[in-house]
Amino acid sequence: MARNPTRDTRDATQTPLAWCGWETRIPSSWRPLDIQGEWERGHMMVGDAEQAIFQVKWWRPKNRRFDAQAWIGERVRKWSIETVKKGPCPKSFSTTAFLAEVPSKGGGSRAIWYGCSSAGDLVLEVAVNRAVDTKTQRTALKKVLPAFRAAAPGAETRWALYDVGFVAPRGYRIRDWKLYSGDITLRFTNDENKSRLILRQVYPAGTALERRELNRWLRKFPFKEHRRYRPAAPNDQWCVELGTRRWQGVKRRGRKQLAFPLNWVGRRHSVAGGVTDPELDRLLLVECDTRSEDGDSLARTAIRGMNWGRYGEK
């Protein structure tokens, strides 16, 4: 059912939006409409039930001598605009520029904000659709843009969309994702230690558990892989604590390896766990495959980091 667009533009409730090392906050009635690309380069379109409102493009320069001021100057000359107005200057971005009115290829216009974060090794281009109503434009320009910030290189990264949040440990980069209604899954890899991490939330939990019990959810991560799982022991009861919260669930432990005769190549220790968050009515699921046997700690940390926007900033 389509939402009332007037109510959406006046929605005062803010929710985190975080992807590929950048984050901001948007009204809870807005959401990603399309996501393309990877960690190094990509774009996301954000809108409500009726229209596209803004687009974020991100890029990570490969040249260590990257000149942010010169790069922005080239973009301004591209649009043949003489006046660059003062726009938002988020703390994470050392160099910024704001073009209030830029023609669009298909007609109409947009406002464009450029931000370069030398600390975060990140360049952003945010284009706001000038065809949307004035209140929506004001929200995007006065609230969403100033809230942008970049993650520091080598730090953990936060991910949030559709009111679902995850935290990936330092060194882990996103490889792919599956975004379905009520089922959000992100897959990360660490090139340094050759480990893999899958983070998933399924909701509502009651409906999910009617479809299959928690043990079976741990066998149904939505990515194809060549290594076969072999259990090392029966599944254990699992409890994860976060402050005063105690989430109960199940954990499995085993090994993954290729089929014979390559079963000795690239073996991995595998830990998968799932708990129920009764407060949000969600299943919180994680699977980590590592060379060493440190997966339990990684899995617990990943569960505690989920929905960071709900349980306080990390």
Image (cartoon, rainbow, N blue to C red):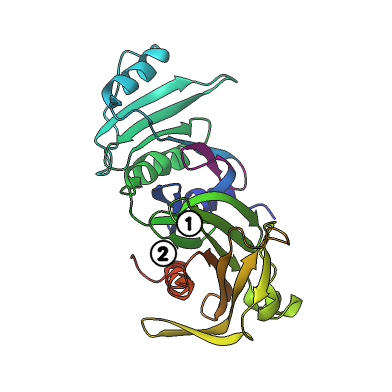
Residue at which label 2 appears = 309
How far is mark 1 from mark 2, CA to CA? 8 Å
- Pick the quarter of the image with the C terminus: bottom left
What percent of the width, then of the height, locates residue 89?
Answer: 26, 38
Relative height, residue 281 to residue 164 (above, below):
below
The disc labelled 2 sits on which kind of residue?
Gly
Find the magenta span and give its range: 35-50
**Contact, CB < 8 Å: mark 1 with mark 2?**
yes
The reply to whether residue 28 is visible in this rendering is no
Residue located at (46% from left, 38% from top):
40
First in sequence: mark 1 vs mark 2: 1
Total numbered badges shown on the rendered structure: 2
The disc labelled 1 sits on which kind of residue?
Ala
Which mark is on residue 160?
1
Q: Using residue 255 as the reference point, say whether residue 309 is left or right of it.
A: left
Q: Using residue 6 as the reference point, say whether residue 59 is left or right of it.
A: left
Please tell me whether residue 161 belongs to the stretch shown in magenta.
Answer: no
